[in-house]
Image (spheres, rainbow, N blue to C red):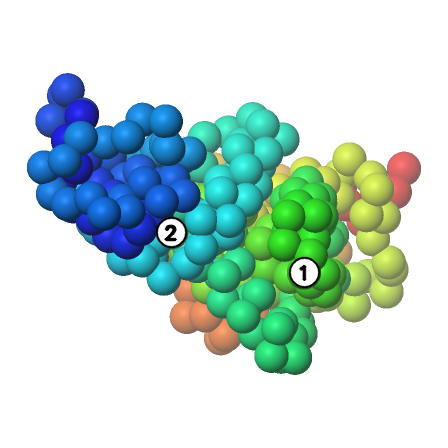
Amino acid sequence: MLISRVINNNVITAMNEDNKELVIMGLGIAFQKKKGDTVDKSKIEKVFSLENKELTDRLKTLLNKISLEVMSLTEDIINYAMQKTNRKLNESIYISLPDHINFTIERHQLGIDIHNALLWEIKRFYRLEFGIGMEALSIIKERLGVELPEDEAGFIALHIVNAQMNENVPEAANITRLIKEILNIVQYTFRIDLDEESLNYFRFVTHLKFFSQRMFNKIMTESKDEELLNIVKEKYKPSYECAWKIKEYIKLSYDYLLNKDELLYLTIHIERVVNRS
């Protein structure tokens, strides 16, 4: 395997037997090397092969400015996340997460830590991903001796959430914020604190995640259950009225109009989550 490009002393690119570009990392792997030289396989520590050429180009740019240690521990975090979620993550996380972690460490060493305004909501709505974020902080502390605040576990969790949804981090932050707003409307309307440990609460939040994702991506669904909506409207009047409040709030705040199916399912979930029995 021959070197096709030297990025720095620790990073090169090469073409494999299928003529696919590989990004290869290893301490000193490119020392006194040039294009066309044979790759020293004994020095290979990490090999990246991304399907998306644009992402591959961005990865090469990123690896030119971050350390081998940061990239290596980030890959271990990503592998841990895929194991815990049992899902393949979008390739973009190989760019977004190491870039975020590297910048965070640089800021922290300058005494600049950013408060995560959505930390409480992330803990509630994305418990698994937040747990992954906390493990990421442990890995960073163990490998680099850098102890980052809990806020960063929340930011890392959002990267994991987005990599599952194939969206960007601002999208996940918007989704988290909207879920919080809807839950606040429900709790204020019924003057109750929702049982966050209940199965119905989990179902409701899951429904809101997918609804929010559709809304922000402007994916419209066809309304089919008008007759059922009329039945539910009469049977669960308080929940329907609450769902209508949410519909009006979303229309005013996000310029999105819920259709009848969305109103139906929202009503049913509200009825379940406020009925503790």
**What residue is at 53 percent from the left and 33 percent from the top?**
79
| The N terminus lies in quadrant | top left
Q: Residue at x 60, y 79 (%)?
A: 110
> Relative to 274, is 63 on the left or the right?
left
Q: Residues within 10 Å of mark 1 (few under 14, many from 20)?
A: some
Left or right: 15 in relation to 225? left
Name the amino acid, label 2: Ile
Out of 43 and 217, give the one closest to the viewer: 43
Q: CA distance from mark 2 to mark 1?
A: 21 Å
Assess whether mark 1 and mark 2 are in contact (beta carbons under 8 angstroms): no
Q: Which residue is mark 1?
A: 146
Residue at 54%, 62% (x, y): give it.
Answer: 173
Residue tagged 2:
95
SS class, disc 1: loop
Residue 124, horizontal then vertical, whole percent:
74, 52
Q: Specify the farthest residue to the top.
A: 17
State the residue in front, 31 or 234: 31
Above-or-below relation of 128 to 64: above
